[in-house]
Structures are given as C-alpha cells and as structure tokens.
Image (cartoon, rainbow, N blue to C red):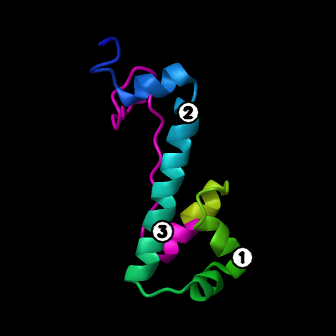
C-alpha cells in the first residue's frame, strides 16, 4: 500500500485535481446563502417580506438564497443590512493559512 498521500491536505488534493478554486467558491456561496436564510428565519422574515424590504421581487430573493447563482456584492450587502448583519470581505494572499487575513497600514 502506498502512503504517498497520507497526511496531505484536502486543499492540496483539490489543487492537484485542478478544482480548488471552484470548490472554495461553491463552499463560500453555500455558507453565505445558509447564513442569510438563518438570519431571515431568526428574524421571522419571509421571502415575500424580504423582497418588499429590498424593493425587489421574490424571484430575486430566491436567487440570493440559491448558492448556484452569482449575486452582486451590493445585493448581498443590502440583504445583510435588512437582517441586521453587515458584509465583510477580505483578500488573502498566496500561501496564507486558511482563515488568515492581513491588514496593511497606509
């Protein structure tokens, strides 16, 4: 039995398969959609009410909650504000540990 891959990381495996970016993007979209749905549920905001608060259609709210769709940052920011949250995004440099962020003073 070969022990070549024992102990290697999932990120490394996905990178070797050429699908790391795709998988990370999908995971982020899944989490954001879930967080928004949970925030709506906690605040007892229906999709119809959310649409009214966002001044948009219920179809657009369904798109926000469907991780297979691409949504704009401004739409996501508005939705977050409606449920009392704020949007936070950071860029992570190459080689940084997962979850690590770095700020740069100007």
Q: Nearer the viewer, residue 67 or 16?
A: 16
Q: Residue at x 37, y 25 (%)?
A: 96
Name the residue tied to disc 1: 59
Q: Position of residue 26 (x, y in %)?
A: 55, 47
Residue 98 is covered by the magenta coloring: yes
**In the visual, does 6 lie left or right of 52?**
left
Q: Position of residue 85 (x, y in %)?
A: 42, 68
Q: Nearer the viewer, residue 39 or 9?
A: 9
Lower position in the chain sequence, tag 1 or tag 2:
2
Secondary element at image label 2: helix
CA–CA distance in space, label 3 to label 2: 23 Å
> From what the image shows, is residue 36 above or below residue 4?
below
CA–CA distance in space, label 1 to label 2: 28 Å
Name the residue tied to disc 2: 21
**Disc on res. 12:** none
Q: Nearer the viewer, residue 56 or 64?
A: 64
Q: Residue at x 46, y 78 (%)?
A: 40
Secondary element at image label 3: helix
**In the visual, does 78 lie left or right of 37?**
right
Q: Can you say which quadrant of the picture contains the C terminus?
A: top left
Is residue 56 visible to the viewer in this orientation of the structure? no
Secondary element at image label 1: helix
**For the residues carrying marks 3 and 2, which lies nearer the camera in this image?**
2
Name the residue tied to disc 3: 36
Query: From which residue to which does the magenta span run?
Result: 78-106
């Amino acid at each position: 039995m070969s022990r070549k891959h024992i102990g290697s990381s999932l990120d490394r495996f996905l990178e070797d398969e050429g699908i790391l970016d795709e998988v990370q993007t999908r995971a982020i979209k899944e989490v954001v959609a879930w967080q928004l749905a949970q925030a709506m549920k906690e605040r007892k905001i229906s999709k119809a009410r959310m649409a009214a608060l966002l001044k948009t259609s219920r179809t657009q709210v369904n798109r926000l909650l469907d991780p297979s769709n691409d949504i704009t940052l401004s739409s996501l920011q508005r939705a977050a504000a409606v449920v009392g949250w704020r949007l936070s995004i950071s860029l992570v440099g190459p080689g940084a540990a997962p979850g690590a962020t770095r700020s740069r003073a100007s």
